[in-house]
Image (cartoon, rainbow, N blue to C red):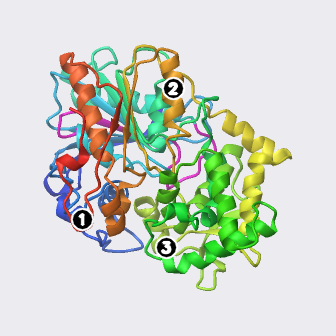
Amino acid sequence: MFESMRVSKHRDDDDLLTEGLGLDGLRNVAPPMFADAEHPTASELRRRAIWSNWRGIADLRPDGGYGDLYGSVASVPGREFSAYAKLPGALQPHRVLVQVPNAFDHRKRCIVVTAASGSRGICGSIAVAGAWGLPRGCAIACTDKGAGTDYFDLDADWGRHVKQAAEFALQSLNDAFPHAAPFTFDNTRVIAVGISNGGGAVLRAAELEGDWLDAVVAAEPNIHVEGEGSRSLYDYTTEAALLMPCALLHPALAPLPQPPFAAQVAPFWTARCAALNAAGLIEGADSAAQAESAYARMRANGWTDAALRAGALSTGFDLWRAVAVTYASAYGRYGVGEHPCGYAFAAQNPDFSSRVASSAERAAWWSDASGIPPGSGVNIIDSKLAAPDFTLPGLQSLRALWDGEGVDAERVRKGIDETRAGLPRAGLPIIVVHGTDDGLVPMAFSSTPYVAKAKAADRDVRYWQVRNAQHFDAFLVLPEYAARYVPLLPYVYAALDRIWGHLDEGAALPVDAYIEARPRGAGDRLSAEDLAIPR
């Protein structure tokens, strides 16, 4: 079941949680350097991966409250156990990593199992699970759920990946503390936590049979259920990729939280309106009327103004196209070089022609890449580029895989159908946390229908809706976003605290809450009063 196992020790300037960087080192805008860019050592890669994944998930600004109001970057010495694991019937393995602190609490045996968000690598959830569990004396079990940055995997089964990571944790604890063995699901507490795709993964794990799992905290989960207003990620992503650039010009959304390059992208958004009108996808004689048409379509399909405003960043960074391209391949289980819309990934020259990636670029993929191009020297190659709106033909092809006909469309929709979530196990305590302003995985399409369906089946699910929280805490590094939004991680940690109190002391689980979080405004420090965390 587990292959290529290795164990490493970490202490002092090489600890489990920050690899010796501490909060100041994590805040450094420059990544830890490699002595030899083409041949980084394992230690250098690990340190840079930890730096990269902390900064990709958490708001570390000095005025943002991390390490003060919430969260921990304590130096935690311990051991890491890593391996490849393969599910029965799977073609490719997934990485599993278990962090065992030296101060593991033998009196309260605890595993926090987590899955990386997005398509991040094995360190992708360190700021979520590690920051809460390691200082508490829990072991942390991580999986990249078969979507890491360093190898191909054409199948996915996220819930079973999470359980297999927990099984590897039990094996690792047996190896770490043979005098206290055996560690089993009967005598070791297991709490699952994840955000975004990781949140969806732990909710899928909650469906699995058996009493192996004690509680779940899922934040902003990418989750899709039958009916109840739910929409698949692929559906609303391809819709946003097409329509949102134009819809964002609607006056109801002003003022938008602007990405740093707003002045550069605004003309392209106006051009998208004209191109959509020419293609018969929206109506209107001028850009204002066209924006009204695009906005009305998105509102009619369930998008809120709050989600649309926050979606401006995903639009500006071309994230909708990046997600749609990768998920088309994943849902349709296409092999390398088989993309149904002719997309590919490659390094590029300044003139946008493809080139072979350099040795230094390849060496840094494991530590630097998020798993979704563009990034880390890898870009999206679009074979359908054509004037006047160069990316529109490819986006229309991607959308047709959802609402069109043909073998490829049927293949992609079949894959999407197979990812629909079921009900969690009866009696399993679950807290779902979601920001009302999430513009990437809107709660109206994901958490809200999931919670409604679970509650209708009398499942033990609690729901925290956080006002003025969007999807990316890391983007609060942008001053305008920091002034407008609150981070979501404080509520994830608070939900874990409430779960711990329930399991450890029999405290009541929290009730559903609509949390009136308050943005701190320009130039101000975040306060506990701003967060308004339920007590």
Question: In which quadrant will I find the C terminus?
Answer: top left
Extreme-right residue of the structure = 406
> Which one is in front, 374 or 520?
520
Q: Which mark is residue 529?
A: none
Q: Is 495 in the magenta?
A: no
N-terminal label among 3 and 1: 1
The residue beneath circle 3 is 359
Mark 1 sits on what residue? 27
**What type is the residue that disc 3 sits on?**
Ser
Residue 400 screen position, x and y as percent: 78, 52
Q: How many marks?
A: 3
Disc nearer the start of the sequence (3/2): 3
Majority secondary structure in the magenta region: loop
Label 3 Cα crowd, 10 Å radius (few <14 / some 14-19 / many 20+): few
Q: Residue at x 65, y 47 (%)?
A: 300
Earlier residue among tags 1 and 2: 1
- The image shows residue 506, relative to residue 157, as above or below, that is above
Q: Callout 1 environment at 10 Å: few (<14), some (14 to 19), or many (20+)?
A: some
Q: Secondary structure at mark 3?
A: helix
Contact (Cβ within 8 Å) of mark 3 with mark 2? no
Nearest the viewer among 232 and 105 is: 232
Percent coordinates x, y for residue 490 in the rendering? 27, 44
Q: Identify the element where label 1 is drawn.
A: helix
Q: Which amino acid, mark 1?
A: Arg
Q: Which residues are magenta?
A: 134-156
Distance from disc 3 to disc 2, alpha carbons, whole Å, reads 50 Å
Task: Please tell me which residue lies in front, 42 or 279.
Answer: 279
Q: Is residue 339 visible?
A: no
